[in-house]
Image (spheres, rainbow, N blue to C red):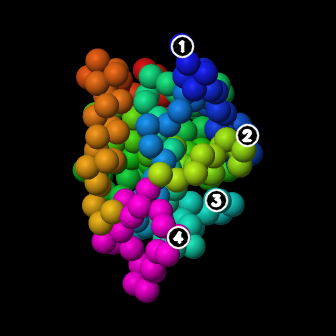
Amino acid sequence: MTSSSLRLRTAACTCGQVAFETRGEPIVTASCHCTSCQTAGQNLEAHLGAPSVLAADGGTDYLLFRKDRVRWLRGQAHLREYRLAATSKTRRVVATCCNTPVFLEFSGGHWFSIYKDRFAKADQPALDMRTMTRDRRPGVEFTDGLPSYKTHSGRFMWKLLTAWAAMGFRAPKIDYVNGTLTP
């Protein structure tokens, strides 16, 4: 086992009542500029005490981890889902103790998109790319050299596919049961 597969990071809500641990390196680190992430970010930030999830340029920064590399430490009873529409396949999960957005999950997906700021600054790797920049806010220009893709790039999709193959093409199911997440 390599040292990167042993790397542990702890993520937590603002007040610390919800926490989980990730093992290994993220599949990818990305800033998403899609309309859904921007709308959800604005809605989530409107709750009393909620931390910001949108960067100044309107992107939402995520670390994507395989579901089988996330372990809950505490506070699952505080987790609640938020969806832009009842039929949405994307759910954002919020820690109700402090209104902190914690992660995003796609129904049937094999990964969690964890909000980058849930990790301590020392545990936040640099972003690999921006995605869905065709939806960026008017007037936003990127001049920092970070790869920026109008949609989900082939590189992004390849990283997800490679991670899924390493998991034996499994997608662990996560359900809410009595206010908790259970694998």
Dominant SS of magenta comes to loop
Please name the residue that numbered disc 4 is placed on.
144
Q: Earlier in the sequence, mark 2 or mark 1?
A: 1
Q: Nearer the viewer, mark 1 or mark 3?
A: 1
- Quarter of the image with the N terminus is top right
Q: Secondary structure at mark 1?
A: loop
Cα distance in 3D space between marks 4 and 3: 29 Å
> At label 2, which amino acid type do we have?
Gly
Nearest-to-viewer mark from 4 and 3: 4
Disc 4 or 1, which lies upstream in sequence?
A: 1
Give the residue at x 52% y 53%: 127
Instruction: Please tell me whether residue 62 is drawn above or below residue 79 in the rendered image.
Output: below
User: Dot 3: what SS?
Assistant: loop
For marks 1 and 3 on the same chain, the one whose residue lies earlier in the sequence: 1
Residue 138 in percent (x, y) is at: 40, 84
Q: Which residues are magenta?
A: 129-148
N-terminal label among 4 and 2:
2
Count of marks, rendered view: 4
Q: Is residue 143 left or right of residue 10?
A: left
* Marks 2 and 1, how far apart at CA: 31 Å
